Image: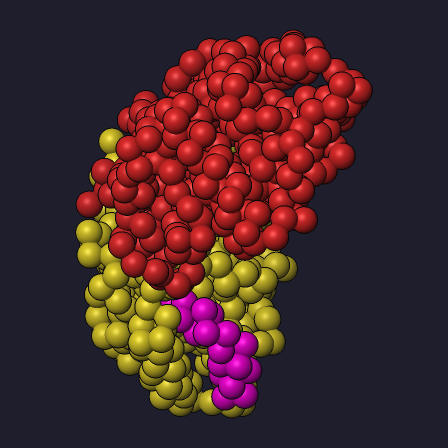
Chain colours: A red, B yellow
Amino acid sequence: MDLNKLARHAGEWLRGSGTDADIVVASRIRLARNVNDVPFVSRCTPDQKNDLAHTLSDVIIDIGIGRDGHYFSLEDLGEIDRLLLVERHLISRDHAEADGARGVAFDQHEKISVMVNEEDHLRLQAFRSGFHVEETWATIDELDNQVAERVDYAFSQELGFLAACPTNVGTGMRASVMLHLPALGLTKQIEQVVHAVQKMGLTVRGLYGEGTQASGSLYQVSNQVTLGKAEAEIVQNLASTVPTIVSMERNARQVLMEHQRERLEDKVWRSFGVLRSARAISSEETIDHLSQMRLGVNLGLLETLDMGTVNQLFILTLPAHLQKIEGRRLEPKQRDIFRASFIREALGES
Amino acid sequence: MDLNKLARHAGEWLRGSGTDADIVVASRIRLARNVNDVPFVSRCTPDQKNDLAHTLSDVIIDIGIGRDGHYFSLEDLGEIDRLLLVERHLISRDHAEADGARGVAFDQHEKISVMVNEEDHLRLQAFRSGFHVEETWATIDELDNQVAERVDYAFSQELGFLAACPTNVGTGMRASVMLHLPALGLTKQIEQVVHAVQKMGLTVRGLYGEGTQASGSLYQVSNQVTLGKAEAEIVQNLASTVPTIVSMERNARQVLMEHQRERLEDKVWRSFGVLRSARAISSEETIDHLSQMRLGVNLGLLETLDMGTVNQLFILTLPAHLQKIEGRRLEPKQRDIFRASFIREALGES
């Protein structure tokens, strides 16, 4: 697999299709798994990590994930390549920045990724564009069963799956949806929604996980607790809460269209105006304007654009993607200039 | 003269031609004159104002200014028409808002305007695009002589021309240039320049006179003192100071082009981006973006646009002009929407 090719198109989670895809960008479930009788990654010797990386990558490839060169030893990749995988949500930022033998395998559609020697020996992930938590669960559950046939998991009858971090003990599951909630932001209801969601035992975070800002009105909603709950229950809790958020966002969009259409139209077109005109632009500013444009396209206010173009730009304009596309390392200032020119071209500006 | 026609093109002061027209938008000189043995306007009875308006308009039309229907009794004009004349600098805001018999005459090219019963009985004004203070002086001096042959001016051998406001006693002259100084603003030198200019006995104001902000980096520099100085001296003082300011602005532009070209290009294009995309925009914001674009066109950074379009937009997007063009009164919110659409059309956006 050539990472250069990867950098030129959006993966599964930004495909923009599936149920409620105008609001639910993607669904994702990950499972934390560890091998029985081997220390957790943080306590492994370098040799143990090496052994784990070999054994587990063989298992994954044997199952069919990471074939055709889709397995990468992260210690062999350069910084930009590792960041590229982070930007695509195929690995975590911690995994990119860690030391020692570790890797990632994913399928060519990027619907599944498996991290080896992240915080846990194995982190299995499944993605699906749109609101499809149950289907995502079916995918990851099947993968988990296949791995379990080949690996002796660290499991306690009492606690469930053991994990390096106590918050992951039990099911080891984090089920999440990525939501695009611009109208709840514009109508100042987002804080209220976040509080309500938290009361349901769910966590709300920004686009790139813990501690990241909700740039571009993109939010990840996920389960808080992994202990003492069955997987199906976690999936069900998320699956039953999301429609409420979706309908609140949809209502807010309708209110905006009815009472502030002109203001909204202006906002959306100004974002388009900046993106098709700027000669230098940061990643953060780009995401904010793309977010407005995404809303505009969904509401039929920006008819000249298609959603595919907007979705692609969300990921292709991130730092590592841009550098892969340009084929060389770019300093932040150069990146801002290249980003602006790349966006103009994508938007059909001469 | 049909004021509707007037509203569709820029007059002399925005023609954008003449010496140093990239920086010196226009030159203007006005003379304050009063009729001997008649009270100043503020002390006139309504009948006296009526008599003055009749007598003086006859004189002006006899000279040839205000022929072909270019004389307007302001008390007969609606609010939008009066504001239109203010926006074109043909009358002052005070003149527009005053009561009683009063008027204005101007030639078809708007190089000369004569206000009757403003603060003084007569305010003679000459305009010229670009840096042409001496030529403007020649024009207004000739007009002044022609009026003096027909009107007995209030004149004191000791003080010079008498005027309603002590600051105008003497020559009654205010000579000014309108400068576009965006680069001095961007390089944070404008305060310093303003102080230096003030030390030369000159005043710096915004686009629409006293108390107005320097929106769009447009400044009026004019003489402070009218008493104890000959007209030629005042003209000379202005004419010799302006080239220094012009060369400072030119240097600042060069510095920006050499050291911050990318930043500047981005700024200019973003202004273009907003103007060709916005769906609602205020007059103030429009002027700021036009100012950036004017700089961009002058520096060859915005090659798709010509200066004529930009200059026209400075005036045609002002509130009264827009309402004349649309042919009806528009509330501020409607105006902002119509302004945005008018600008998009002018910039060739569909």
Across and down, in percent, residue B165 comes to 59, 71
Front position in the image: A295 or A42: A42
Quarter holding the C terminus of chain A is top left
Q: Is residue A245 visible?
A: yes
Name the residue: 23% across, 38% down: A348
| Relative to A185, residue A335 above or below | below
Please identify the dominant SS of the magenta region.
helix
Across and down, in percent, residue A109 comes to 35, 26
Quarter holding the N terminus of chain A is top left
Front position in the image: A30 or A315: A30
Q: What span is in magenta?
A: B180-201
Name the residue: 42% across, 14% down: A18
Across and down, in percent, residue B138 comes to 27, 77
| Relative to A155, residue A105 above or below | below
Q: Is residue B5 visible?
A: no
Asked if the magenta segment contains residue B194, the reply would be yes
Count of numbered circles on the image: 0
Name the residue: 61% across, 22% down: A175
